[in-house]
Image (tube, grey):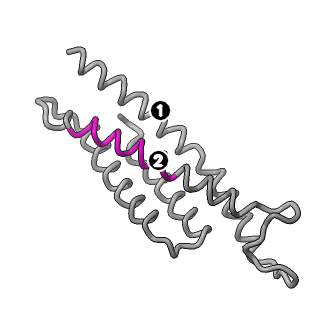
Amino acid sequence: MSSQNSNVGKLKTLSGALDIMVRTKHAFQLIRKELVEELGQPKSEEPTPVADAAPGLNREEVLKLLSIFESRLAFLLLQSIKLLSPAKKKTNNNVEEDVALKTNKHIYSQLLRATANKNTSLPERIDVLVHLLDQLAQGSSVQ
């Protein structure tokens, strides 16, 4: 019984952490918007990858932020999947947990595919992440 309470507590904590990550969607949308604006402006004297100049975004920092965020999201999703999987096999047929498990597995799979593709541009990576956060907000809001 204590392991059930422990798993319930862990699931609530993971659900809260995932919810916080979902709330960052707007920040990523703003970053993407600024990146697209920077890419749209012709730079005659400097190549596009150099963004250390003026008030624009530092692309290297955005890339680091995105990589860290993706890895943390993958970790939280995997832990959630691990905790929900045994719960599915027990006598409790909790429909909400089944939906959350399917949603998290699907999002985790898409996230792994997206991070494995090294040819994706930075705005495209942010688009994928925002899309995954949307799916997460819709599908696993109840855990």
Horizontal side, residue 81 vs residue 23: left or right? left
Residue assigned mark 2? 73
Q: Secondary structure at mark 2?
A: helix
Q: Which quadrant of the view contains residue 53?
A: bottom right
Quadrant location of the N terminus in the rendered image? top left
Magenta stretch: residue 47 in it? no
Question: At 20% across and 33% down in the image, what residue appears?
Answer: 87
- As shown in the figure, which amino acid type bears the numbered disc 2? Leu
Query: In the displayed image of the protein, which residue is found farthest to the bottom?
Result: 44
Mark 2 surroundings within 10 Å by alpha-carbon count, few (fewer than 14), some (14 through 19), many (20 or more) = many
For the residue labelled by badge 1, is the local secondary structure a helix, a strand or a loop? helix
- Image coords of residue 64 (percent x, y): 62, 55
**Residue 75 lies in the magenta stretch:** yes
Identify the residue at image location x=52%, y=58%. Answer: 129
Q: Where's residue 131, x and y in %?
A: 49, 59
Q: Is residue 35 above or below residue 10?
A: below
Residue tagged by mark 1? 16
Q: Earlier in the sequence, mark 2 or mark 1?
A: 1
> Seen from this angle, which residue lies furthest top?
2
The residues colored magenta run 70-85
Q: Amino acid at mark 1?
A: Gly
User: What secondary structure characterizes most of the magenta part?
Assistant: helix
